[in-house]
Image (tube, rainbow, N blue to C red):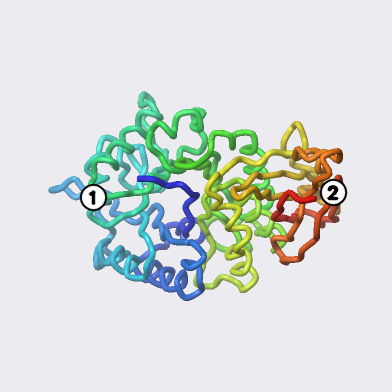
Amino acid sequence: MEVLRPPMGFNTWNTFGAEINESVIKETADAMVDKGLLDAGYEYLVIDDCWSKKKRDKETGKIVPAPDKFPNGMNAVSDYVHSKGLKFGMYSCAGTRTCADYPGSYDHEFLDAETFAEYGADYLKYDFCYKPHKADGAQLYRKMGMALRACGRDIVYSACNWGSDEVEKWIRSAGAHLYRSTGDINDQFESYRDIAVSQFEKLAYSGNGCFNDPDMLTVDMHGQGNVANGGCTDIEYKTEFALWCMYSAPLMLGCDVRKISDSALKLVTNKTLIRINQDIEARPPFSDRQEGLKANDRTTIFKLLSDNQIAVMCVNFADGERTASVMMDNCGIPASSGYGLHMVDAFTGEDLGVQKEFFEVRLQAHDSAVYLCDIAK
């Protein structure tokens, strides 16, 4: 199947962890539709770890849902999600056990892929815990890639090996549509900042069909939930979301969307930022610094888009205010050309007109600015 744009949706792990059940999934599906998230493009509702019994079924060998969490079975949940116009996602692991110590898919890949297809899954997150020491990680992901192709259903393949084994160099050949490129994110500015900095130079491997996945978003968690670690400010969440959009990263919400704040809902449904994220060319951004992003300073990054547009992001990772500069020459528009950038603020919609040679913006600590631009005289 083709996945030409980064997937968008919701994953249960960041907020709920093991505390998932049929009611939570149905309420989340309702909220995704009622709050306009589906209309904005968030189409996948993915159940993460802890959904199954601790052991496989003795007769069939299949992984089966925990009856106390999903008393009507997984097909009932899948059917409900689909009835809302959403797509349904599930979770397994390449090892003998999942990260939370439930049955993994090691040596059961084809049976499990068939099982997920029977459940009506449209998406599989495939983790990397409890891998036998002698097993080759790349080969394990190839096995599940083949199993999904054989299962008779189109299923988005989300590989989650945490960036191990230089995954960006081989995961596309394994059939994955997105791949986790780092360890787990947590709800803290330093966490997403370090992830963004670590992946900037690796984004050249990401593109149509197989996208670098820097993990689920923590926007609007504010220190609550399963990956709580102090939380972030609204300004910091704004920068996180904008970076994921500039990276053409999958946009998988992790907050409790049943309770999402109005400000966060406005942010994650921002049409200009989503346009940047979902751009069909999916080109990696480039920096005005030779060293890429710096974790304690400000940087300007540029992203070429389809329709001859350019996205520009000024980000301030420093702990104090900084002035960020947009030097037109750094994106390939010298003063001698007579051209500049016609800039529109992605957050406010303000038209800043044509800026030539040089433009600057004052940013608070951990703040950012994003502009959608056209080349103009």
How far across and how far down the image is residue 155, in percent? 33, 49
Circle 2 crowding by C-alpha within 10 Å: few under 14, some 14–19, many from 20: many
> Would you name the residue on which mark 1 appears?
115
Note whether 173 is above or below 43 in the view shown. Answer: above
Compute the Cα span from label 2 to label 1.
58 Å
Note whether 182 is above or below 257 in the view shown. Answer: above
Mark 1 residue type: Thr
Left or right: 236 as drawn, with respect to 22: right
Q: Outermost residue toward the top?
A: 134
Circle 1 crowding by C-alpha within 10 Å: few under 14, some 14–19, many from 20: some
Mark 2 residue type: Lys
Task: Work out whether residue 367 can be spotted.
Answer: no
Q: Residue 93: name its quadrant.
A: top left
Numbered disc 1: secondary structure: helix
Q: Which mark identifies residue 252?
A: none
Task: Work out whether residue 161 can be spotted.
Answer: yes
Note whether 226 is above or below 96 in the view shown. Answer: below
Circle 2 or circle 1, nearest the eye = 2
Note whether 85 is above or below 4 in the view shown. Answer: below
> Would you name the residue on which mark 2 appears?
356
